[in-house]
Amino acid sequence: MSLLFALAGMLAPVQSAAPACTPDPPLAYVCGAEKPEDVLVLPGTPWLIASGFSPGAGLKLIDRRDRRLIRWFTGVPDQIRPDPALTRSCPGVLDPALFNARGLSLRQLDERNWRLLVVNHGGRESIEQFDIVVGEGSPSIIWRGCQPMPAGQVANSVASFADGTILATVLTRPGTSIADFVQGRVTGGVWQLGPGAETFTLLPGTELPGNNGLEVDPDQRRFYVIAFGWHAVVIYDRADTRLPLARVDAPDFMPDNIHWTDGRLLLAGMRLDEPVCGGLRRIANGIADPMRCHRGWVVGELDLAHHRVSTVAYGLPAPGFNGLSAAALVDGELWLGSFQSDRLAVVPLPHPKETP
């Protein structure tokens, strides 16, 4: 069932940044996140991980119990342990001063260990690989290596299968622009790095208008790609990607990232047709509107049984938050990431109304 979140007491839309990191009820904020474009729950722990889509912003570790964050990967010796298998093509150890983190992906290795993949734009276009070790106290992070993207290809999101296969989306290949995918033209693709492979290869049939968010299915057979220009999720069978299995359009919002979280496949993004911002995203002189005007936000759930996106939560424009790009669900709270804001937003998950 769709959970319509009618937010009461909303402030009038304001298009300038909030002067301080004060709440915009019902949104509470965790400040200092530096464009947390993607956010993940570290399952079974009180911790979340957020990327930082800005030079040097790197990774943040968030304790959701007191809503505090720290800069996580700082490059100290204990955090560097190169794996020869993961450094054959890597040009060197990751520089935290340049680390510009975008899409994130977590895969559990055993009871205490996880593999974290991160799209990096800082100093190189690459997929950085980390080991996360969970124990007493805060989890530790260890850089293990990287895989450069093919020349000219800039990754957006990343995911992996249990056999070690890595997938990465490219939003705009060389010679294409954001304006192209806003107008529905093909600009990107999904690139694959198989176990033992030296370089990524483009998967046939995955070229879409603005390949954005990416997730794999627990059954290890399918994967999901956000086509940002279509405002849709496209579903593929990994055994044969030449034709997609399905396309599922989102209702009046622009989904960005997509992740399994708390057993639900959630996607999040800004409102498509926002009256405060003049309606739909516009193209002027061949340049797409950067969407600095604060739009409403939506979190949806992909209903695989019925091939539809149901609404989980939504809100009107908020003075202190814009550019919703990711959502993580844990203990009845939605944690919202942004590719524009200097903070994470937190909002209680709405509950369905009971029928009298």
Image (spheres, grey):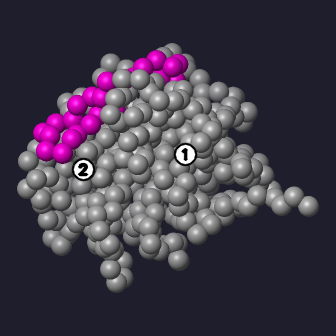
How far from the left and from the top, in percent, is residue 198?
12, 39
Q: Which residue is found at the position 38% from the left and 42% from the top?
A: 221
Specify whether residue 237 is painted magenta. no
Quadrant holding the C terminus: bottom right
Q: Amino acid at mark 2?
A: Gly
Q: Which label is found at residue 164? A: 2
Above or below 48: residue 124: above
Label 2 – label 1 distance at C-alpha: 24 Å
Could you tell whether 77 is left or right of 172 in the image?
left
Can residue 130 be seen here? Answer: yes
How far from the left and from the top, in percent, is residue 148?
19, 41
Could you tell whether 266 is left or right of 153 in the image?
right
Q: Which residues are magenta?
A: 177-205
Q: Amino acid at mark 1?
A: Leu
Above or below 308: residue 82: below
Q: Based on the displayed image, in which of its 4 quarters is residue 109 positioned?
A: bottom left
For label 1, the crowd category at 10 Å Cα-Cα, with few meaning under 14, some 14 to 19 and many 20 or more, is many
Q: Secondary structure at mark 1?
A: strand
For label 2, the crowd category at 10 Å Cα-Cα, with few meaning under 14, some 14 to 19 and many 20 or more, is few
Q: Based on the displayed image, in which of its 4 quarters is residue 174 positioned?
A: top left
Above or below 186: residue 212: below
Q: Residue furthest bottom?
A: 136
Q: Which residue is found at the position 22% from the left and 40% from the top?
A: 193
The answer to whether the residues at label 2 and label 1 have Cβ atoms under 8 Å apart is no
Q: Earlier in the sequence, mark 2 or mark 1?
A: 2
Q: Which label is found at residue 267? A: 1
Q: Which residue is found at the position 30% from the left and 29% from the top?
A: 203
Could you tell whether 201 is left or right of 184 in the image?
left
Specify whether residue 194 is painted magenta. yes
